[in-house]
Amino acid sequence: MPRFIFLKKFMSAIPYLAIFLVGSVLFIIMENNVSRAAYFLVYFVLATAAIYLDRKILWLSSAIGFTVITVLPYLHHSHLPLESKNYSTIYLLFMLVNIMLSFQLSISKKLSENIISAQKETENLLHQNLKIKKTI
């Protein structure tokens, strides 16, 4: 029985562990393949966070992504022939994707709340219908 309690507590840590693991693996891949195209791998961290639909996880993945796209040019500036405007474009695109995912998260939360309220309303209507049937 104690194993199940441990597993339930561990379930809440799985999304955070997944974000850290994906971020670490992508950084290792980016370190081994230093190129302009490697910057697109950072979006996999955001995609992983989008699966969980949690604001804390999204902010964590954003922080990891910004860290990776900051550290990579610092370590390999000589291998990356990018101008400063290219770096600002990379940051801007990453920030825009973060904003878009934040809006998507807000919309999904509102839809979830609407579904829950519709379910409660349907249950109330069912109970009222059962009371009417009993009185008839």
Image (cartoon, rainbow, N blue to C red):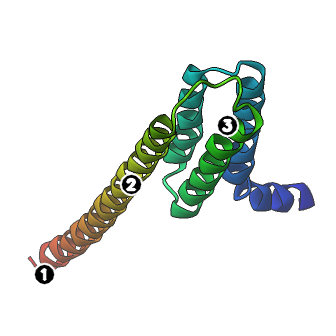
Q: Amino acid at mark 3?
A: Pro
Who's the residue at 73% across and 34% down the image?
A: 27
In three-dimensional space, the C-alpha distance between marks 3 and 2, rounded to whole angstroms, equals 23 Å
Is tag 3's residue or tag 1's residue first in the polypeptide sequence? Answer: 3
Q: In the image shown, does 129 or 78 lie closer to the viewer?
A: 78
The answer to whether residue 13 is left or right of residue 51 is right
User: What residue type is disc 1 on?
Assistant: Thr
Amino acid type at circle 2 is Ile
Outermost residue to the left: 136
Q: Quadrant of the C terminus?
A: bottom left
Give the left or right position of residue 56, taking residue 119 as reference: right
Q: Which residue is mark 1?
A: 135
Where's residue 94, x and y in %? 47, 44
Question: Which residue is at 35% across, 61% downward?
Answer: 106
Name the residue beneath numbered marker 3: 73
Q: Which mark is residue 103?
A: none
Q: Residue 28 appears at what percent x and percent y?
A: 78, 29
Under tag 3, what secondary structure?
helix
Task: State the CA–CA distance, disc 1 to disc 2.
Answer: 54 Å
* Residue 3 in the image: above or below residue 50: below
Q: Secondary structure at mark 1?
A: helix
Residue under the point 70% across and 59% down: 12
Between marks 3 and 1 in the image, the one whose residue lies nearer the viewer: 3
Residue that numbered label 2 is attached to: 99
Mark 1 or mark 2: which is in front?
A: 2
Q: Residues within 10 Å of mark 1 (few under 14, many from 20)?
A: few
